[in-house]
Image: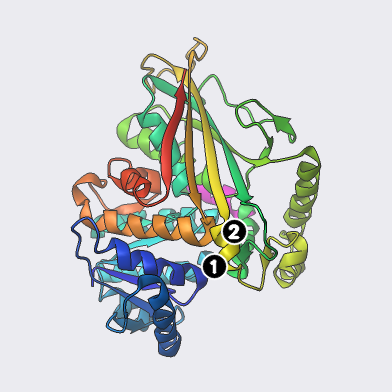
Amino acid sequence: LDIILFGATGLTGKNCIKHLYKLTKSNGRSLTWGIAGRSKIKLMQVLEECVSTTGRDLINIPIIIADVSDSDSLNRMTGQTRLLINCCGPFDVYGEAVIIACLETGTHHVDVAGETFFMENMQYKYNRLAAQKGIYIISACGADSIPGDLGVVFLQQNFEGTLNSIETYLYLDEIEPKSPGPLLNFATWESAIEGIGKLPEIVSLRKKMFKKRLPAFEPKLKMRPQMYRNNVSNAWLVPFLGADRAVINRTQRYFYEHENKRPIQVNPYEAIDSAASVQFINLYKNIILFLVKYRIGRKLLLSFPSFFTAGMFSFENPSDEKSERTSYDIIFHGTGWDENVSASELNFRKPPNKSIIGHVSGMNPGYGLTCICVTMSAIVTLTEPENMPEKGGVYTPGAAFARTSLVKQLNDNGVTFEIKSKM
C-alpha cells in the first residue's frame, strides 16, 4: 500500500478517512491506502460509519491489525506500506515504538503529535538512522504545527528583503449560535498533559541535541507583558503554550545550519476577546502548570479535564456540529528590512523598515484542519520526492515541505494561506 492510517478508530483517525478517500484519488493521483488498529471489529465499524461521508462502500479498504505493545505487529503493519500516518497518541507514551517499526522496515512516517519533548527526543535519537535509511519522519503535521510553522515559511517566501521577527496571534472561535459541550476530546487533553509534564526534561535534551547554540541576532524580539493588546491583533494577547514556538525554532535552526539563512525570531500568542477572560485563562494556566509538575497533580488533571479547562476538554467527544462551527485563525505580523541581510551580520544596526501581515485559517482545528493537513502531508511526501530535503531524517513540517506544493494544495482544500498586506 502507499499509505496506512494507524489509529483509525480514534476521533482524529476516523476523521482522516474521508480525506484519504478523496485526496488520494484527486488531481490525477491513484494512491492505495488502508487502515490499522487493534480491533478488526472496531475498524470495520469505522469504515461503515464513514460511508455516509464518502458516499461509497469502503468494504474493500484493507484492514491491518497492529498494537503498539506488540513490536512484531507494528513491523508487519509498517512493512506493508510506503508511508504511515500515525494518529495514535499520546505520542510521549505510544509514539516511539511506531517510529522504531518504521525505521526497521524503511517506511516514511507522518503524525499529528504536539508534544515538544517527544518530537525533539525522536530527532535526537533517530535523525541519523532515518537519514541513513533515506526515510522521512515528520511530526507536528496537524493544527500543531502546520499552520504556525509553514505560515512562517510562507511569510518568509513572500517577503522581499530579510525578515527579522514575527509575532503570531492565534484565534479560536465558535460561530454563533454557540452550542454546549467540549471543544476537544480527552485524548488531546492527555497528549497536552503528557507534553507539558516533560518541560523540565527538554532543557537537558536540547543541551545534548544542539551542541552549538544559535548566535543572538539583533534587534532581539522580546516577549510581551502577560497582558498586552496591539492594533494588529485587535485583541488581548497571552503567550501560547502549544508546540508552535519549539517547532518553528527547529525549522529556523535547520535553515541556518543547512542553507545559511538568517533565523527568524518568532513569539506566538493566543488572542483573547476581553481583559477579564485573560485573567481567567491565566489563573487556569497557572493552576495547570503547578499541578503538572507532580504525579498526583497530573492524575487530578487527567481525572477532571472539564473542571480544569472550564469545559473545553472532556471525556465526551465534541459534537460534529460544534467542531464544524469552530474557526481557527493565525495572524502573522512580521518586520524586517527591504535589503538582504546575511546570517553572519548578527547586530544589524539599521532599524526594521518593512512589515508584512499574513493569515492562515481553517475550520474545525482538532478534527478537520488537522486531518486535511496530515493527509496532504503524507501525499506530498510520497508524490514530490524531488522537492523534499535531499536526505532522509527527522524533520519539522517547515523544513520538510518548504519547497513542495503543500501550501498550495492546502489552499485548494480548505486551509487558507494568504498575505494580507505589505508595508
> Quick one: label 2 or label 1, which is nearer the N terminus?
1
Say which of 59 and 123 sits in front: 59
Q: Is residue 202 magenta?
A: yes
> Secondary structure under badge 1?
loop
Quadrant housing the N terminus: bottom left
Query: Alpha carbon of mark 2 to alpha carbon of mark 1: how far?
Result: 9 Å
Residue at screen point 41% across, 51% down: 414
Q: Mark 1 — residue?
A: 90
Estimate how packed mark 1 is, as few (under 14), some (14 to 19) or many (20 or more) residues with alpha carbons within 10 Å: many
Q: Which image quadrant is residue 383 in?
A: bottom left
Res 112 visible: no
Magenta residues, dominant SS class: helix
The segment highlighted magenta reads 200-208
Instruction: Say the numbered circle drawn on residue 195.
Output: 2
Q: Give the residue at the far front of this rendering.
A: 177
Q: Position of residue 139 (x, y in %)?
A: 42, 56
Say which of 388 and 127 sits in front: 388
- Which amino acid lies under the numbered mark 2 shown in the image of this protein? Gly
Q: Is 291 displayed left or right of 361 in the figure?
A: right
Res 214 visible: yes
Residue at screen point 70% across, 64% down: 180
Picture layout, residue 41 above or below residue 47: below
Q: Position of residue 262 (x, y in %)?
A: 40, 27
Say which of 43 and 300 sits in front: 43
Residue at screen point 32% across, 59% down: 378
Residue at screen point 23% across, 70% down: 32
Asked if the residues shown at circle 2 and circle 1 are in contact, with their CB atoms under 8 angstroms apart, the answer is yes
Q: Is 164 displayed left or right of 279 in the figure?
A: left
Picture layout, residue 400 above or below residue 225: below
